[in-house]
Image (tube, helix red, strand yellow):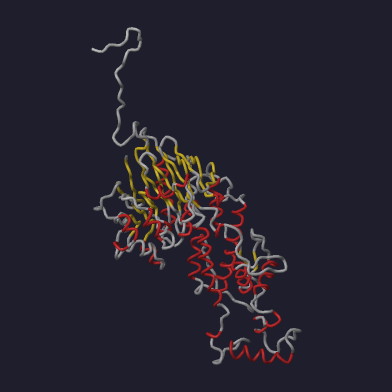
Amino acid sequence: MDRLPLSSSRVPRPRRTRRKIPGIKGKAKVLKSVRVRMYRQGLGDCFLVTFTNAAGEQYHMVVDCGVLPFSTGGDKRVDLIAQNILSETGNHLQTVIATHEHADHISGFKSAREYLGTDPAGKYPGEKPANPPKVDKVWLAWTEDLQDPQVKKILAKGNALSLSIAAAVMGLGKEKSKAVRDILLFNGAELEIEESPGMGADTTAKPKFKISKTMQEIMELLRGWGQVEYLEPGDVQKLTNFGVRVHILGPSRKMAMLGGNAPAYGEGDQGLKLTQASAFMAAAIKFAGMELDEKPEEGLSQADINALYKISLPFDPLQSLPLEVACQPYPLPERPTYPQKLQASYRDFYKEFYGINGESTDQAPEWRRIDTDWLQASESLALQQVSIINNTSLVMAIELTESGKVLLFAADAEEDNWNTWEAERGNLDQLLANTVVYKVGHHGSINATDQKMLMEKMTNKELVALIPVDVKRAEDNQWEFPAKVLYDLENPTEGLLYHQTGGRIILNCGEQCADCKPLYDENLPWPGKISSDTSADQLWVDYLLAF
């Protein structure tokens, strides 16, 4: 029998064994569950993400709260949503997130102001709740930091586009401008206009307009709710005691459309840059016979507009006849640039071929005239403006560190945005591979999900897609949400999202749902648990992951 040396004072002790919990490496679990509540207000985003830890503590995160103006009863439902949020959170929101300045993401913050937060600027008077909620932090993208030099350039470009589009809408009139006005709804701009009299109208009162600041005012309201943090790609926010890391993936400062100046096509005497937006703006304002109501933030005065208009003309002014001159009755006033002997020929030409001079003849069919057709280009400018704002979206990968699972909230970031995402230590591919919940961008718009990255990198077998869209309402407004290439109601197995998720898709509504219940197949093998509001309001649908 072996013995210890007599000189040794060390006595061997029995070795302790640490009790291990299955699936956890040597320690007890921190995160008990995460619940994603998708609200159903119509066409708009509003999510309440609730983390519950093993101690029973909860962390509540609101991601956006908005609805498009045409969603029937949308504002009323947003107020109901606000009440539900306060009820669920006990009047305490740890984090409120506004991803970008579009009505379908933030308009609800204004509609529900009497429930959610304070109004330090006093812009929205009304009865305040007796027990206002506590908001710890407000997360915004770096693109909302008004002191950032790059943000000032983005605002300047956006404001120029706003003026261009608004002027074009006025010039086109109600019927022809409908498509443009529908696009403007995303900016919270509901333009109710009267038919424009056009150039040459006998009026001295010129209509005025200014840049719509509705969305900017809502962001200002949000800045007063709690401690504001402007987040950059690569940033990581840790939720202490919950085992959660929030990776900020975008928007990238490297995106061209969020970067420097637009390409210059010319330059005026005052050093003004003649871009597509500024030239169109100047021409549209002049055509609509409008004046600026105030000096816009990019510093363009009415004199600047006139200068831009002059250098934007495709022909030398000395070789062209202004429309207001052509519209005057014969004889035309003598002008140095129009010799008297040519007056009659000018008059006869415009009268015969364009019906100018107030006469309508068989020889002057309207199809020959293009005096308003060029304004239709405003639709492409409006889409350009929507893209700029979409690409300021705050993109988050919410990592549950103990399991490695990820919830991806991409807001409305478009395809070219996805390819600029940045993650801490370059682990973007790993975050995408571990994504088990994808909040589908822009209601399933075709340009808001990078199809290649979806198919090649978001490959987790537990992937679930949440599409915040009321399909029937989208169809009523002739918008294809969601895009059929992603999810086709008639042939669902052909869509890319269906392929990646095995059909685990939750929509706010489907056209075949007579009672407007959320659309999902309960018979599929869901990794989490689905439940929905069974009250008459049918206000939400939940997806719960428990650990």
Indicate the position of residue 144 as horizontal and vertical percent values: 56, 51
From this view, report whether residue 17 is shown above or below residue 501: above
> How many numbered callouts?
0
At horizontal 75% and vertical 84% (from top left) the residue drawn is 335
Indicate the position of residue 30 as horizontal and vertical percent values: 37, 35
At horizontal 42% and vertical 42% (from top left) the residue drawn is 60
Q: Is residue 115 in sight in this rendering? A: no
The N terminus appears in which quarter of the rendering?
top left
529 and 200: which is toward the camera: 529
From this view, report whether residue 71 is shown above or below residue 17: below
From this view, report whether residue 157 is shown above or below residue 197: above
> Where is residue 470, by image quadrant?
bottom left
399 and 55: which is toward the camera: 399
Indicate the position of residue 257 as horizontal and vertical percent values: 55, 60
Indicate the position of residue 204 as horizontal and vertical percent values: 67, 74
Q: Is residue 426 in sight in this rendering? A: yes
> Where is residue 307, by image quadrant?
bottom right
